[in-house]
Every structure is written in C-alpha cells, then in structure tokens.
Image (tube, grey):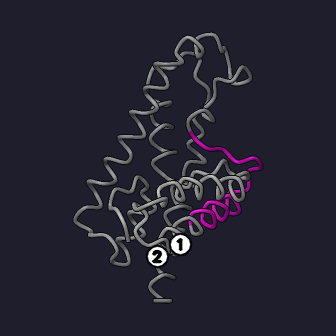
Amino acid sequence: MGSDGHLNPAVTIGFAVFGFFPWSEVVPYLLGQFLGAFVGAALVIIQFYPHFKASQNEADGNQVGIFGTRPAISSPFLNFMSELIATWAFVFILLNLGNFTQGLKPFIVGTLITVVGMGLGTTTGFALNPARDWGPRLAYTILPVPNRGNAHWEYAWVPMCGPIVGGILAAGLQVLIK
C-alpha cells in the first residue's frame, strides 16, 4: 500500500473505513492535515499581505478563491458529484499503484493529481483534499486579511463531503475486486 504519510483526509478516512489504515491514527492524521493546510495559508497571508491591502474588494482579486474552491457554475449536487468522481479516481489509482513511495511513484502521484485536476477539476476548482480547502478557508475567515471578501462557507460542505465519499467508495471498490 505504501507510505502512511498521506496528507489528504479523503485518503485517510477511505483507507480506514476498509482496513487499509488504523482507526487509532485517523484523528491525529486529520488534525495534522488540517493544521498543516491552515498554517500554509497563514504563511501565504503573511507573504501577500501588502497585496491584500492593495486589493480593495473581491473584484480586485481579494477573494476566498485564493485559498478555497468555488464552482464555475453553482449546482450543489453536481458540484458534489464532481468532487466525488475526481477523488474516487485519485484514490482508486493510488490503491493500485502498490507502494507509491518507491522509484518514480511519488512523481507519478504528483502527475496523477495534475491529470485528475485538469481533467475533472475545472467545474469545482477540485478540492480533492478537504484539508486543502477547509484549512485555508478557515485561515482566510479568521485571520486579519485586509479587505477580505466572502469565504463562502455555504459551499464548503462540497469540498469536504464529496472527496470523503469518493475516497470511501474507491477503497470499497478495491475491497470488492481483491
């Protein structure tokens, strides 16, 4: 299966549901994943603080899209399905790479993320990773970003739930075909 150093709650939860990862490690992994994404976003806010100050509104570019996903066209159920399908494909392929820490497999995983994002992510901005969306969205919401726009929490369930369901379904299919 490879390294247990996954950075994605959809992978962690999907793997745990079907016994590929121990439940006792799920909460610490989730905390690390979300905290890491939050801290990364905080560093971006610090780095680009003068730019946020100069951007007076969302039209100038000061918007949550810098940190979290938003759909090209708002259709909550279909946006959810887009995230589910993209994450399902990603996790299912991961499960079939074998030990994805050896040889060129880390490069293949990075390429896989790029391909899934380019092929399936344009409709939603492809979260694929709930921590990657929620951690930065929370940082944008609570940290002192000058001229902050709307964080669009009404949409945030999509990049949380879609990837988690996709990860669970991919791991479930893996169990069925083995």
Q: Give the image location of residue 105, x and y in percent.
A: 48, 61
Query: Counting other residues with Cα less than 10 Å from the Cα at mark 1, is it few (<14), some (14-19), or many (20 or more)?
Result: many
Q: Residue at 50% of width from left, 89% of height from top?
A: 177
Disc on the earlier residue, 1 or 2: 1
Stretch of the chain drawn in magenta: 68-87
Q: CA distance from mark 1 to mark 2?
A: 7 Å
Label of residue 92 in the image: 1
In which quarter of the view is residue 128 placed? bottom right
Q: Is residue 17 above or below residue 60?
A: below
Residue 112 on image: x %, y %: 59, 59
What residue is drawn where x is 60% and y is 14%? Answer: 51
Q: Residue at x 42, y 40 (%)?
A: 37
Badge 2, how many Cα within 10 Å: few under 14, some, many 20+?
many
Q: Give the SS element for disc 1.
A: helix
Q: Amino acid at mark 2?
A: Ala
In front: 97, or 59? Answer: 97
State the SS at label 2.
Answer: helix
The quarter of the picture where the N terminus appears is bottom left
Horizontal side of 58 relative to 103 (left or right) equals right
Q: Quadrant of residue 166?
A: bottom right
**Magenta-drawn stretch contains 62:** no
Which secondary structure class fits the magenta region best? Answer: helix
Tell me residue 20's x, y (percent).
Answer: 34, 74
Q: Position of residue 161 (x, y in %)?
A: 52, 60
- Residue that badge 2 annotates: 171
